Image (cartoon, rainbow, N blue to C red):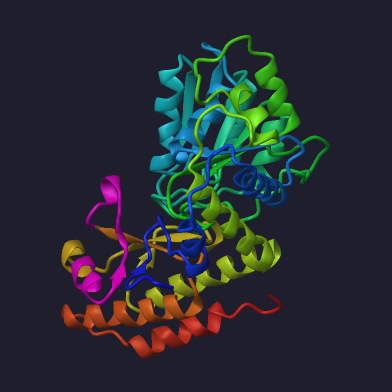
Amino acid sequence: MTEKELLLIPGPTPVVDSIYDALSQETLGHTDPRFAAIYKQAIQKTKDMLKTDGEVFVIAGSGTIAMEMAIVNTFAPSEKLLVISHGYFGDRFLKLGEAFGIKVDVLQSQWGKQVSPAIIEEMLATEKYKAVTITHADTSTGVAANLDELVPLIKKYGALVILDGVCATAAMEEDMSKTYGSDGAKIDIVLTGSQKAIGVPPGLAIVAFNKTALAAREQLEHVQAYYCDIKNWIPIMNDPQKYFATPPVNLIYAYNEGMRLVLEEGLANRYLRHKAFGTAVREALILYGMQPLAEEEVAAATLSCILYPEGIDDAAFRTALAKKGVVVAGALAHLAGKAFRIGHMGNTTEAMLEKAIELIGGTLNELGFSVEPTKAVERFRELAFVRGA
């Protein structure tokens, strides 16, 4: 990798040289058949990863654009949306819904915990919701949603399942062909971005609709969007030589290469690797007196929110660590200054994370805390090894 520092924030994540090489290729015209062929490959690889029976959309934009595309193409004003929120980014659906006149109810968990399925069922039994959003891995808390519990529960009440995979896609299973517990209990929409577990620079919004979700769009005579209206994008996704809006040509090159690496590793192997890395990082940091916000059974495979021991100054710790070449992120909202967030996803390697564990320990010692980096590194190595991958 060409990075001079370890970028271990919740995103963007490290980019490998083959992706940079793809990004730096000569820019072709956006309707050039050579570029159209690359774009078509990237779209097909996305379908292969998510296993949708519908359409995928790979367009210029951020994860927020992907969230908006999912909402605006399924809801008419005054219809009801239920948001299952495990942190800051789940709550963002509230503002999105309100912007389009959608009635939104939010079930907010205590940070570090999951929303109780019993409470969700109580809401679903009381109100008729068009769809329910789930944040698969919340970037603010490091809490993962339990899809095996939530998808069949939501489908029991006839709502669409909209999965925010921004911090999970390509690292945690998001199989749109999978039936969860009963006939028809499937994920209807998955949305994500390019810069997290896929490991490509920021700038692409990726959304997949299954046939049920596409039918929901057909039932809407009009949507409050132009750029985000999937009807304007379906012809381009099926034939990238057609024009609607200019795609980011070089980012598509990079994304195509990133998706090649994802599929080459194998999805099952990739999910095992991320799970092992997440557990190993958290268990190693516990030996430094740090505590993960999320308990292990609900912790995400892609990032962790880590609570400081008493006496750590957040700014001093992260500044000193950055000078050693390891960049981690501060915590959000009421946890600001009390915790940091570390990403362990995408193109991150065992060697990179091992180095980070060692340097975190060295930084703590410099700040006056007596810890043993050697023991933490040994613990990381013990748990990070992926058997059978």
Q: Is residue 328 magenta?
A: yes
Could you say which quadrant of the image residue 272 lies in?
Answer: bottom right
Could you say which quadrant of the image residue 375 lies in?
Answer: bottom left
Residue 208 point in image, percent of width and height:
64, 38
Identify which residue is drawn at 47% across, 57% down. 23
Give the vertical position of 176 relative to 330 (above or below): above
Per the rendered image, the range of residues in magenta is 318-337
Identify which residue is drawn at 54% across, 53% down. 253
Give the vertical position of 213 relative to 1 (above or below): above
Left or right: where 358 falls relative to 207: left
Q: Is residue 295 visible?
A: no
Left or right: where 73 falls relative to 187: left
Left or right: where 176 falls relative to 79: right
Number of marks drawn = 0
What quarter of the picture does the C terminus occupy?
bottom right
Q: Is residue 211 magenta?
A: no
Q: Residue furthest bottom?
A: 374
Give the vertical position of 105 relative to 114 (above or below): above
Identify which residue is drawn at 44% across, 54% down. 201
Residue 361 point in image, percent of width and height:
30, 81
What quarter of the picture does the N terminus occupy?
bottom left
Left or right: where 217 falls relative to 89: right
Q: Is residue 216 visible?
A: yes
Residue 196 point in image, percent of width and height:
47, 55
Identify which residue is drawn at 57% across, 66% down. 275
Name the one closer to the observer, 294 or 222: 222
Name the one closer to the observer, 374 or 211: 211
Residue 384 point in image, percent of width and height:
54, 78
